[in-house]
Image (cartoon, rainbow, N blue to C red):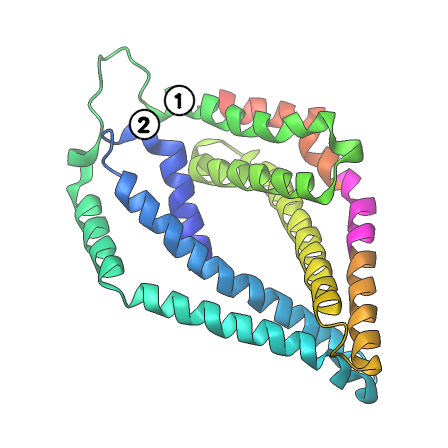
Amino acid sequence: MRVATRRMRAAWRVFDGAFRAGKTKKMRRHLETIADRLGAVRDLDVLIEDLEAYRLGLDEDRRPGLEPLLSVWRRQRANARTQLIGELDSDRYSSFVKEMDAFLDAGANAAAAVAAPTAPHRIRDCAASQIWTAYEAVRAYELVFPWADVETLHELRIATKWLRYTLEFFGETLGPDSARLLKRVVALQDYLGCLHDADVATKLARDILVARAGELSKVETEAIGAYLRSREREVARRRRGLGPIWRAVNGAPFRRALGRATAAL
């Protein structure tokens, strides 16, 4: 569901000019709220699943040491899920669904008026610039990539995500190169996503160790500290392996293939 909200938001970002001005503003704003609620739950799902998998790999006598961290994340997830269910059960969400139904049923009546026959408005006229603009936002990170910190790499991931969605929306019009291009973009996005997840887990584990330093037993402190270090190693490992995956998108072969794809429009 979170992915669906992201795709809807991306669709409006790419095709915003196709709709009447102001027609979608309220729906987009509410969709963002829903996405935030879903994201809070799903992010904790990922953290909990990763920690539980890590715990299963430990000797049984060491597993209880991770319980304080698991308990905090489970409690946070329960609270986030309560907020999500409250949102989905609200009158505000019901109104959103009705407005969305009406918007989709409106069809061409929701479309922006074309100023003149010669104004660019067809997909074949506009898609290439949309795609290359999304690609330029990714390639701009070339200047800082060699020394980019994790926060900057997370921003690169977001730019890569928008490029992915843009390519997917136009994919069937782009010819035989589109599938290969999309595969490389998805690989970069997924790799950066795993790096980000490991970094978030590192920071949250460190927060627990600091905030509850006087409460944790020696076994708990050692277990959570070992998990923290394992996530730090994962971040370092993924940063070392990022180069080839980045070059597969940033390199000249990708640009040539993208040029052929957009030239097919």
**As displayed, is residue 178 above or below residue 80?**
above
Q: Residue furthest bottom?
A: 61
Horizontal and vertical percent for residue 58?
Answer: 81, 80
Q: CA distance from mark 2 to mark 1?
A: 10 Å
Residue receiving disc 1? 126
Q: Position of residue 72 (x, y in %)?
A: 61, 74
Q: Which quarter of the image is occupied by the N terminus?
A: bottom left
Provide the secondary structure element on which disc 1 rests.
Answer: helix
Numbered tag placed on residue 17 in the rendering: 2
Q: Quadrant of the C terminus?
A: top left
CA neighbours of label 1 inside 10 A, class few (<14), some (14 to 19), many (20+): few
The kind of residue tagged 1 is Cys
Residue 179 sits above or below residue 114 on the image = below
The answer to whether any part of residue 254 appears in the image is no
Q: Which residues are magenta?
A: 235-244
Query: Could you say which is closer to the camera, residue 169 or residue 143?
Result: 143
**As displayed, is residue 80 above or below residue 17?**
below
Callout 2, which amino acid?
A: Gly
Residue at (24, 53) in percent of width and height: 96
Q: Residues within 10 Å of mark 2 (few under 14, many from 20)?
A: few
